Amino acid sequence: LVWSDEFNGTGAIDANKWFHQTELPIGGSWYNSEVQHYTNREENSFVENGNLHIVAKKETFTDQGYTKQYTSARLNSKYAFTYGKVQVRAKLPAGSGTWPAIWMLGKNITEPGGYWTSSHGTTPWPACGEIDIMEHLGDQPTTIFGSAHGPGFSAGDAITKEYVLENDRFDTGFHVFGIEWAPDYINYYVDDVLYQQITKEDVLEETNGSGEWVFDHPFYIILNVAIGGNLAGAPNAETVFPQTMLVDYVRVYQK
């Protein structure tokens, strides 16, 4: 174990470990046409009863000159690493339009308002690389998916695979989402079940030789709950807010 947060205590998140990313991208709308503001308020992210709470709220909120109807939180880890095992135990929100994610970006990304951009930002997305440990769409409560993005295989062309719970939902209990990341592969797990492996060879095969393996440098962890967007769709009247992602722990291991 080389880095972790067990989310013990009460109140604000540990500022030595996490950074609130709140700055809007150019144009005032979050990526993928998400509709929320991310804030650094305790109403949207706090620690209580041994869990991190990331709370998506339906409320009118104005920031940076833009008024939006939803708020949430997006946390960047102040720790970055190359290769290892990541485990995150979490209970996911529910409801159409919610889009929680546990994922990673290359520390070298150039992105407005990101923790690492000012000190290490040299490379735009997707050349920096993206590893999606877990993404979940609220209108599909039994399903999550794990993905990888890079040059030649990004956005709708990402290499991705679903994992479906049998006779259960991801919003009714905790599950452990994880990866094992090595120089030439990324393994994806739910509760120690290996459901996806992405290799250098897969990248070349999926892109007819044009893809580039960009998972060979430090990455950092992101925890967030987005609302709406191209993938999740607009929240509808049946979605009850607030909606919360509970995170019991985040743990990083290396050999």
Image: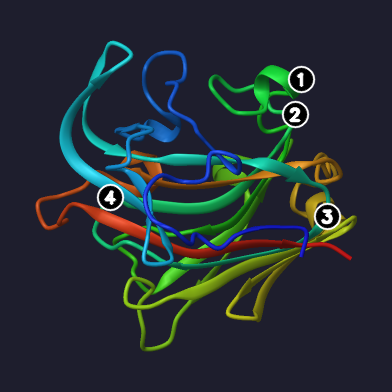
From the viewer's perspective, tell me whether residue 221 is left or right of residue 238.
right
Residue pointed to by mark 2: 108
Identify the mark nearer the N-term, 3 or 4: 3
Q: Are marks 1 and 4 in contact (CB under 8 Å)?
A: no
Q: Work out how far the residue at label 1 is from the one at label 3, CA to CA, in angstroms.
A: 20 Å
Residue pointed to by mark 3: 83
Front residue (pair 155, 183): 183
Residue 216: percent from left, percent from top: 86, 44
For label 1, the SS is loop
For label 3, the SS is loop
Q: Are marks 2 and 1 in contact (CB under 8 Å)?
A: yes
Crowd around label 2: few <14 · some 14–19 · many ≥20 (10 Å)? many
Front residue (pair 3, 70): 3
Residue pointed to by mark 4: 97
Residue shown at the point (80%, 41%) measured from the top left: 218
Residue shown at the point (83%, 45%) measured from the top left: 213
Name the amino acid type tagged 4: Gly
Frontmost of labels 3 and 4 is 3
Which residue reaches farthest front?
9
Identify the mark nearer the N-term, 1 or 4: 4
From the viewer's perspective, tell me whether residue 187 is left or right of residue 161.
right
Identify the mark nearer the N-term, 3 or 2: 3
Q: Are marks 2 and 4 in contact (CB under 8 Å)?
A: no
Residue 189: percent from left, percent from top: 64, 73
Rendered image coloring scheme? rainbow
Crowd around label 3: few <14 · some 14–19 · many ≥20 (10 Å)? many
Residue pointed to by mark 1: 122
Name the amino acid type tagged 2: Asn
Residue 42 quadrant: top left
Residue 13: percent from left, percent from top: 46, 46
Q: Work out how far the residue at label 1 is from the one at label 4, CA to CA, in angstroms.
A: 33 Å
For label 2, the SS is loop
